[in-house]
Image (cartoon, grey):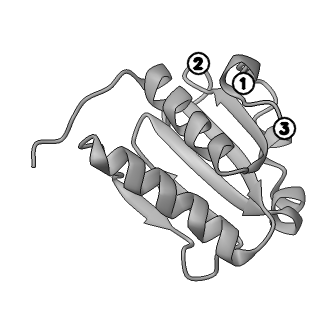
Amino acid sequence: MQEKTIEPKALAEKIVTILDLHKAGGIKLLHTEEKTTLADYFIICTGNSSTQTKGFADEVEYRLGLEGITPLHTEGYESSTWVLVDYGCVVVHIFNAETRRFYNLEKLWHEAEEVDISALLTEN
C-alpha cells in the first residue's frame, strides 16, 4: 500500500477529531514547529484507564490506516500509562491522568502555541 501524504495541520486536526469522537479527555494541540525539530504538532490527551489509553491509540491508528496513513513508531502500548504514536510531523501523547500530571508536557512545552481546537470538538 502506498502511504498517503497529508499536511501536518490537517493530520493533527484529523487526530483531534478522532480522539474527541472517542471521548479522550483534556485534548490539547500544541504547534511546536518553531520550538523543536521533533514534530510540527504535539497532541496531548488523557484516558481514564489503561484500556482507554490503548483504545485511543488503536482507534487513531485504525482510522488513519484506512486512509493509508501509518505511524512511524508507537511506544508505551504495553504499560499504557503513556502511549506515544509518532506520525513524524505529528506526535500523539495519550496519558493516564497521573502520568500526565507527573510529566506535565504542557508546562514543558509552554512556549509552543496552543492551537484553538474548539471548532473541532463536539459538545458534550
Which residue is painted at 59% across and 70% down in the image? 54
Query: What numbered label is drawn on residue 124?
Result: 3
From the viewer's side, name the closer residue of 95 and 48. 48
Which residue is painted at 68% across and 31% down in the image? 29
What residue type is disc 1 on? Ala
Between discs 1 and 2, the one toward the N terminus: 2
What residue type is disc 3 on? Asn
In the image as oriented, which residue stretches furthest toward the bottom? 78
Please say if 95 is above or below 16.
below
- The residue wearing badge 1 is 112
At which x and y percent is residue 41? 56, 31
What residue type is disc 2 on? Glu
Taking 111 as reference, is 83 left or right?
left
Instruction: Quadrant for the C terminus, please.
Output: top right
Asked whether the beta carbons under mark 1 and mark 2 sit within 8 Å of each other, the answer is yes
Q: Nearer the viewer, mark 3 or mark 1?
A: 3
Label 3 sits on a secondary structure element that is loop
At which x and y percent is residue 10? 45, 22
Taking 11 as reference, is 13 left or right?
right
Which residue is painted at 72% across and 29% down in the image? 121
- The residue wearing badge 2 is 34
Q: CA distance from mark 3 to mark 2?
A: 33 Å
Image quadrant where residue 17 sits: top right
Label 1 sits on a secondary structure element that is loop
At which x and y percent is residue 112? 72, 24
